[in-house]
Image: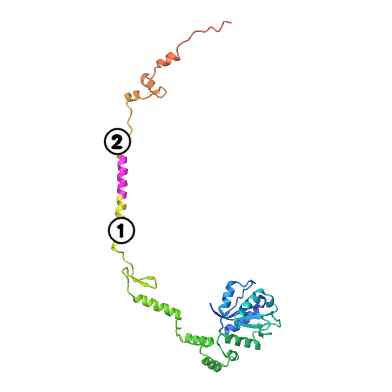
Amino acid sequence: MAYDVFLVSASEDRDMAKLIARRLRALKFKVWFNQKQVDETFDAKDARNATNSTSMLVLWSENAVKSDWVRAAASVGHSRPGTLVQIGLDKTIPYEPFRTGKRHSVVGMTSRKTPDGFYKAVEALGANDGRTDLREWMGFGSKDEDERADWLAAHPNDPLALHAKAQREKELGVKPAPAPEAQGAAALAAASLKGPANGNGHRQVAGMTIAAAAARPSASSVIETVEDTIVSWGTMIAISLAILGMLILAWFFRSQPIAPEMRMAMPAISDGTPVAATCPAGQVPRSLMNDVMQPGPIINDTED
């Protein structure tokens, strides 16, 4: 954003800086002023705002000459010939190269008292912006309505006159004219709506596509949707048939009781199967009688 005035002051002089900024804004100067400035580093953002300003107004004081931020900002203004305007808040003399420059004294300035130095500083700022007779405007009182009207008529392009014109139109209910950028955007939009539409019902505007109407599905997209649906149902049917076939096979090859003949031919597991087949219930197997229950020799354990 471009500014008319880049206001520079020490943080200790913030109250006086606020007063001066308020006075300049009442004259419709666009003022850059950071009321919360605490950092002493003049960074890239500060430099950009300073170079985007028509004038730089430096408030010198005993505190300002000790501030690195003030000296850095003033150096940027000094590097741009004709943009630096200096004000003295007290009798402190700044260092070179600012020592030899003109300084407008505003010692004793209050909300009700305006020193001559402030009028001269305003005239210097106005000259950089191509504005004239601002001191005459500042001399008008609240009852000098006719003089104010004559001054505004004599300076129709001054920000004060433009502001007064906008206020009158607002009171009369007249809508302000759109900015040139807005007019260009409106014209581009109107031209795009009148332009031919392509095959999909869209209009091309500066590389962008604006829908002229609700998009209708094309024949190809409908066919693709139907084909996808058929494939999905076919897959589900195939899976269902495979599951049904597995169930049928499982029923045919289900488990059957083993016949005795087949059981006898099977390998014995710990002789359990032959014993169950050859020894009915209630009888002792012959192998057990021969190997375990066969009586042995009688031993007389009473002899020494």
Pick the residue in front: 15 or 299.
15
Magenta-drawn segment: 235-247
- Where residue 94 sits, quadrant-wise, is bottom right
**Is residue 242 inside the magenta stretch?**
yes
Instruction: Count neighbours of disc 1 (C-alpha within 10 A) and say few if under 14, some if 14 to 19, many if 20 or more.
Output: few
Sooner in the amino-acid sequence: mark 1 or mark 2: 1
Q: Name the residue beneath numbered marker 1.
A: 224
Q: Is residue 300 left or right of residue 17?
A: left
Q: Name the residue beneath numbered marker 2.
A: 252
Instruction: Count neighbours of disc 2 (C-alpha within 10 A) and say few if under 14, some if 14 to 19, many if 20 or more.
Output: few
Answer yes or no: is residue 121 visible: yes
Residue contact at pointers 1 and 2, CB within 8 angstroms: no
Which one is in front in this view, the residue at disc 1 or the one at disc 2? 1
**Mark 2 falls on what kind of element?**
helix
**Mark 1 falls on what kind of element?**
helix
Answer yes or no: is residue 113 visible: no
| Location of the C terminus (image quadrant) | top right
Magenta segment's dominant SS is helix
Q: Real-space Cα distance between discs 1 and 2?
A: 43 Å
